[in-house]
Amino acid sequence: MTDLMNEGAKDFDANETRKMLSSAIGPSILEYIFLHGQMHIMDFGAGTGLIRSQVAPLVKKIVAVDISKAILSKLVSKPELHEKVKIAGI
Ligand SMILES: C[S@@+](CC[C@H](N)C(=O)[O-])C[C@H]1O[C@@H](n2cnc3c(N)ncnc32)[C@H](O)[C@@H]1O
C-alpha cells in the first residue's frame, strides 16, 4: 500500500496549524480524561506524537497505532518517548 505520508512526515511537526491544534487538544485531553501513572493507553492515528508528548509523562505505556510507516519512523526517532511508546502499524 502506498504511504501517503512519506513526504508529509518530514515536516509533520513543523506545520503551524498542526502545532496550534496539538497545543489546544493536549490540554483538553488532560482536562476531561483522568490519566494516571499505571495506565496503558492506545493512541489511534498517533502521528508523530505531538499530543502524546503532552500525555506520555502522565501514563505508564502508550501503544501508538498509525497507518503510515513514515510517520511511525519519525515517532520512534524521539528519544523522550522510547521508554513509553510501543509502535503498532496497520
Ligand atoms: C492529524 S494526524 C494525527 C496527529 C496526532 N494524533 C498527534 O498527536 O500529533 C492524523 C494521523 O492519522 C493517521 N491515519 C489516517 N488514517 C488512518 C487509519 N485509517 N488508520 C490509522 N491511522 C490513520 C495518519 O497517518 C496521521 O498520522
Image: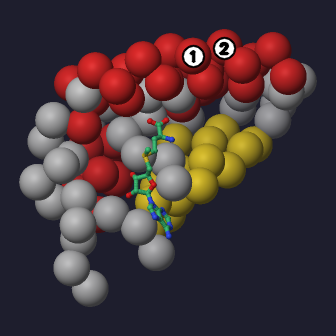
Quadrant placement of the N terminus:
bottom left
Q: Is residue 78 visible to the viewer in this orientation of the structure?
A: yes
Residue 27 is tagged as: 2
How many residues crowd around disc 1 within 10 Å: few (fewer than 14), some, or many (20 or more)? few
Residue 60 versus residue 54 in the image, above or below: below
Q: Nearer the viewer, residue 47 or 64?
A: 47
Which kind of residue does numbered mark 1 sit on? Ala
Q: Report which residue position mark 1 lands on.
A: 24
Q: Nearer the viewer, residue 74 or 26?
A: 26
Which kind of residue does numbered mark 2 sit on? Pro
Is 64 displayed left or right of 57 in the figure? left
Callouts 1 and 2 close, C-beta under 8 Å: yes
Splitting the image into 4 quarters, where does residue 16 fall?
Answer: top left
Residue 90 versus residue 33 in the image, above or below: below
- Residue at horizontal 44 percent and vertical 35 percent from the top: 49
- Residue at horizontal 41 percent and vertical 45 percent from the top: 47
